[in-house]
Amino acid sequence: MTDMMAATPAETTIADVTDPGPGDSSVPPEPTGPVRENVFVLDGVEVRYSGVRAVTGVDLDIARNEITAFIGPSGCGKTTVLRSLNRMHDLTRGAEVLGSITYHGENLYGPKVDPAEVRRRIGMVFQKPNPFPKSIYDNIAYGPRINGTRKRAVLDDIVEHALTRAALWGEVKDKLKSSALSLSGGQAQRLCIARSLAVEPDVLLMDEPCSALDPIATARIEDLMEELKEDLTIVIVTHNMQQAARVSDRTAFYTAEADEHGRRVGRLVEYDVTETIFTKPSDPRTEGYITGRFG
Ligand SMILES: Nc1ncnc2c1ncn2[C@@H]1O[C@H](COP(=O)(O)OP(=O)(O)OP(=O)(O)O)[C@@H](O)[C@H]1O
Ligand SMILES: [Mg+2]
């Protein structure tokens, strides 16, 4: 596996930290207590576009095997913060991420970190399903092929496994050579999730993944997220309060307010266990939003 960092052998790399390693399988695992293992720690994060602040004051700890929801009114910076977690802003001219983001304890924006490897480990699913204009099979095999997997039998296994995990295998196993563009919206979104899973990510970032889907397809994706969090860490942006309440372990509420120059800037208002956010939030702005009085 390619290391995310071009490090000298003596240094610990992000790959070392995230790979479980061989270990001694005869030793039973320690009972897991309430200890949360942080995947991301954001400290004083601010993102600017062409020098203009879009979102500021973001302090968050995102834990392994949890689903973290980002909620808040349009324009408050949810997508902007989400994209800072896999260095997508590197691809946007003029975008700048300030403050500190660590990933498994390492500076995500450190000079030795390879952004392409970051985006492999930290996959992203977008609001609008974006299957490639290729066959279903080739969509899933795309990432593994780029990573150097050539053997047909190995690719076959990866494709079946990823589609099974994404709860799509049964619907497409007899038409793997058909164009992915022939799938329904809900199927296409599960295909995109399968495509992300095929490169075995550590984290899945989902930006309003269900907003174009009907309630049945939405329920399938929510069930899927619940299963996937056994193995991965998920961060989801959603405008659907019930969805955030149903699926997430923790919720971050953002809002946008005018700064001293009258410019709207997104801010993290409150971050807590989802139940607390929805039943006894500590900030009146959170309560106003979740009860529909604001935003
Ligand atoms: N590429 C960009 N260039 C310039 N400004 C941008 C860019 N992307 C987002 N912004 C601005 O940053 C702010 C936050 O946008 P963002 O897309 O993060 O909001 P959001 O909370 O995801 O909103 P929505 O719920 O509508 O998706 C907005 O003021 C937006 O106009
Ligand atoms: Mg958005």
Image: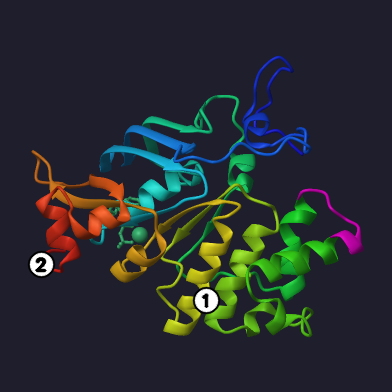
Q: Which residues are magenta?
A: 147-154
- Quadrant of the displayed image that contains ligand 2: bottom left
User: Are discs 2 and 1 less than 8 Å apart at CB?
Assistant: no
Identify whether 286 is placed above or below 14.
below
The amino acid marked with disc number 2 is: Arg
Measured as percent of width and height from the top left, residue 199 is found at 70, 53
- The numbered mark, 2 or 1, whose residue comes first in the sequence reads 1
Is ligand 2 closer than 8 angstroms to the Cβ of mark 1? no
Q: What kind of element bears circle 1?
A: helix
Q: Residue at (9%, 46%) from the top-left corner?
A: 262
Q: Taking 176 as reference, is 45 left or right?
A: left
Q: Residue at (66%, 66%) from the top-left corner?
A: 165
Considering every residue shown, the one lying at the far top of the view is: 10
Locate the N terminus by quadrant: top right
Residue 60 visible in the picture: yes
Q: Nearer the viewer, residue 34 or 99?
A: 34
**Magenta-span inclusion, residue 108:** no
Identify whether 133 is placed above or below 267.
below
Q: Nearer the viewer, residue 167 or 184?
A: 167
Residue 76 visible in the picture: no
The amino acid marked with disc number 1 is: Arg
Residue 291 has which mark?
none
Q: Which residue is mark 2?
A: 293
Q: What kind of element bears circle 2?
A: loop
Residue 220 has which mark?
1
Measured as percent of width and height from the top left, residue 267 is found at 22, 45
Q: Residues within 10 Å of mark 2 (few under 14, many from 20)?
A: few
- The image shows a total of numbered marks equal to 2
Q: Residue at (74%, 18%) from the top-left corner?
A: 9
Q: How far, Cα to Cα, is label 2 from label 1? A: 30 Å
